Image (cartoon, rainbow, N blue to C red):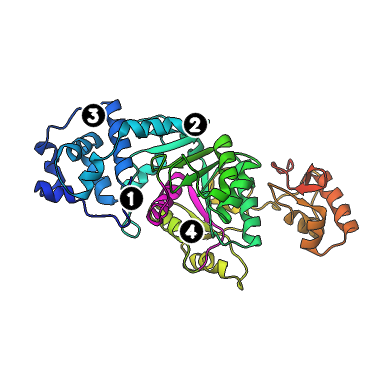
Amino acid sequence: MEPMGEFEEIDFLADSGMSSAGSFREMIDAPVEDAQRERIARMGLCAALDGGDPRMAALVREQGPVAVWEYLRNSGSTRATAVRVRGVDVEAVQQATAACGSTFLIPSDPQWPLGVADLAWSEPVNGLGGEPWGLWVSGEGDFARACSRSVAVVGARASTAYGEHVAAELGAELAERGYTVISGGAYGIDAAAHRGALSCGATVAVMAGGLAKLYPPGNAALLTRIRDAGFVVSESPPDCVPSRARFLVRNRLIAALAQATVIVEGAVRSGAQNTVSWALSMSRPVLAVPGPVTSAMSVTPHRLIRNGEATLATCVEEIVSVLEPLDPRRETLPWAKSGAGGPLSDQERTLVDALPHGIGVSVDEVCARLGWNVVTVLGVLSRVEQAGWAQEYRPGVWRQPRQPPSQ
């Protein structure tokens, strides 16, 4: 498939002299859309045309993929759209799909993620929009179920150590609570969120190119781990190479697959902002993690919070509170009740606040965070562990327990 760059006009409509899409089926002898023909048509359209053109997506939705596919293949038009479609070897795409161990999903499949349907009615972003015609997925398990309880964690590629630490903790804590973490597999915040999630659960990486050669190459080992423990997914055929336009189109899938989107870091011009725009377009919750006011990577999250487009998120509990506001099992304030060992002192609460829920921290790091000496930290850790508010889940590595102490 040749990169299209900017999305072109649906020029085959002009060739046919059609005044409206409503007359489409009357102009051609539309074939019966049985499951196999539909799968071939959707695969062929994905291979020939970049997704994200809202007009083409609307046409396929209204007229059916088989009718559109057959018309383009048989129209005899010399326009680029029809030429691309006639140039697709669907059998070769099927072989490439099998060779890279992926599956091509269409909306009638049980594993099709239901959230992408919202792209059909959401407002376009930068002129792009529309639901995908199909998805290539590699991984084990139920993809639809994995996406049904999920959070996208996105942010800057040129991230800071602070941002990567926060993204990794959020990824781990969300995965530990049973959420699938969805991101783009890129350097920086994406990779940190994926790594954190892999330590405790499942994660999904949405690719801008095909699954035959995972991109970026520097994250190949990480993306292989994600494929083995979760899923990698793409709207493009296996041998497709990434392009700038495909990254923007990919972002709409990240937002559509997830119940909510969390942005950790982003400069003034940030690709993560594009993902946030898609989430807002679909009326999905957006949360932003604050950062140092002196950091250029804090500009986009702070602006989103200031403009009321994103909810402030400083911990996983605040993310869960947006997704599960009526869940009686959730404690909106961890300190609203005392633990099994009785009320915690201010000093004990300060220490527990310094402990993450997911990947954990060393005693030395706790000392550095709080400015306390080792003797004090170890003494307080001993007390909060007995109260049920701390857990040494690896030797010398501490975190908050997955479940709060019994109340």
The label number, if any, that marks residue 52 in the structure image: 1
Q: Is residue 198 left or right of residue 65?
A: right
Q: Is residue 293 left or right of residue 381?
A: left
Residue 178 position in % (x across, y down): 59, 39
Per the model, the C-alpha gap separating discs 4 and 1 is 17 Å
The residue tagged 3 is 33
The residue tagged 2 is 142
* Element on which disc 3 rests: loop
Q: Tell me which numbered mark, 3 or 2, is placed earlier along the sequence.
A: 3
The kind of residue on which mark 3 rests is: Glu
Q: Which residues are magenta?
A: 241-267
The residue tagged 4 is 272
In which quadrant is the C terminus drawn? top right
The kind of residue on which mark 2 rests is: Asp
Per the model, the C-alpha gap separating discs 4 and 2 is 27 Å
Contact (CB < 8 A) between labels 4 and 2?
no
* Element on which disc 1 rests: loop
Q: Tell me which numbered mark, 1 or 2, is placed earlier along the sequence.
A: 1
Per the model, the C-alpha gap separating discs 1 and 2 is 25 Å
The kind of residue on which mark 1 rests is: Gly
